Structures are given as C-alpha cells and as structure tokens.
Amino acid sequence: QKGLAELRQFHQFFDLKSPANKVVFSPTLARGLNYYTGCIFEVAVDTSATGQESVKMGSIGGGGRYDDLTAVFGLKDVSGVGVSFGAARIYDVMEELNLFPSSIKNQLQVLCLAGDETTLVPAFEVLNQLRAAGINASMHPETKYKKQIKYASNIEVPYIIMVENKEEGLSIELRNMSENTREKLTIKEIITRLS
C-alpha cells in the first residue's frame, strides 16, 4: 500500500507535463538493493523510433533514490537521487545507429608521427607549433611505423607529418594521404600549407 501511495504521488507531479521520452513503469526492475531506498530507474535506448530494432542494448544509465547513503562518507542524514550513464554503452549504440556526424571523423587535419624514440620530443614540438597556429593536429604515441600508418588510414586523416633523424639532421616530411605524395618542408612551410 505504501508503494502504491508513492506511485500515485509520483504521478501527481509527473503527469503535469508530457515527457519527451517514453516512460514505462516496471515492477520487476531491481538495482542497488543494498543502498536505494525509494524509486529506482533505468535508461534504455528506444530503437523503435529509428526503425532499427536490431540494436539490442541493456540500460545505458540508471539510478535511484537513497536515504543516508552519504553516511558511508561521513555526511549523515542526507538523502538524494543519484544517476550514472555508461559512456561506453552510449558510444556503442551511437556507432551502431550511425549517429556520429561525418564531420567529427574528418576534423583532424594532420597526424604527427615520430620515426623512433629519439624523435618523440621533436615531433611533440612540431605538434605544439601546429596547434598554436590553429591547425587541428594530433600525435600517435608509438614509433612503430606500420601501426602509425594503419591508424592514420583508419581515421582518414588527410595529412601526416613524419619526424625522423637522418644523417643530415632532423627531417620533417609532409605526406598527403589521398594523393600519396611527400615533401620535405620546414614547419613554417607546413603551417602555411595547412592554414
């Protein structure tokens, strides 16, 4: 009877405004049995609206009401409502439903690569100069060439900069990934080219 009374009170407030999303009451929902003391909830993806019912994913978020949970952390007699979202699950759903704009993938202009351990710091210096010039740049953290190139291809970055130690000194090479061309340039020339 107490539970029914709480539900009626909940609906007195909830029904004042139509929710933007589908809300379903489930008497079988169970979570946080050792700390939630009232209403609990979960957030799920409603794929019926997208026409892609094949996407099966559990809850992407959830939470509930608790009394005095904060006492565990030394703050007594404080009640509240907590909620958390699963970023990895949300990412998986968005990827499966193809919800990421293509512009996100193609924002990176250039990827800096270090030829070996000795050129990591110079490559990082090149990266900082590119960013200071307003060029959207990133750097691959490893020095394994095949892995670097495979990564650059996978993210479809238009340019890579290879920083290597040669006999004549430090070499900076700009490579156009789509045209498969390469040029040895100074960092100033590269900034001019990419700006």
Image (tube, helix red, strand yellow):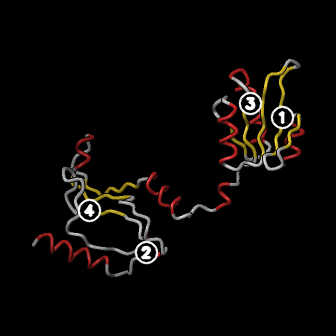
Pointer 3 residue = 123
**Residue 62 to residue 190: above or below:** below
Q: CA distance from mark 4 to mark 1?
A: 57 Å
Identity, as a three-letter code, of the amino acid under mark 3:
Ala
Compared across the picture, whether 59 is left or right of 47 comes to left
- Residue at image x 59%, y 61%? 100
Residue 59 on image: x %, y %: 36, 60
The circle on residue 183 is none
The circle on residue 40 is 4
- Residue at image x 39%, y 59%? 60
Residue 136 on image: x %, y %: 73, 47
For marks 3 and 1, the one nearer the N-term is: 3
The circle on residue 173 is 1
Dividing the picture into quadrants, the one containing residue 110 is: top right
Q: Are marks 4 and 2 in contact (CB under 8 Å)?
A: no
- Residue at image x 69%, y 46%? 153
Q: Nearer the viewer, mark 4 or mark 3?
A: 3
For marks 4 and 3, the one nearer the N-term is: 4
- Residue at image x 68%, y 22%? 117
Q: Nearer the viewer, residue 58 or 122?
A: 58
Classify 10 Å Cα crowding around label 2: few (below 14), some (14-19), many (20 and above).
few
**Residue 53 to residue 109: above or below:** below
Classify 10 Å Cα crowding around label 4: few (below 14), some (14-19), many (20 and above).
many
Q: Nearer the viewer, residue 49 or 6?
A: 49
Identity, as a three-letter code, of the amino acid under mark 1:
Glu
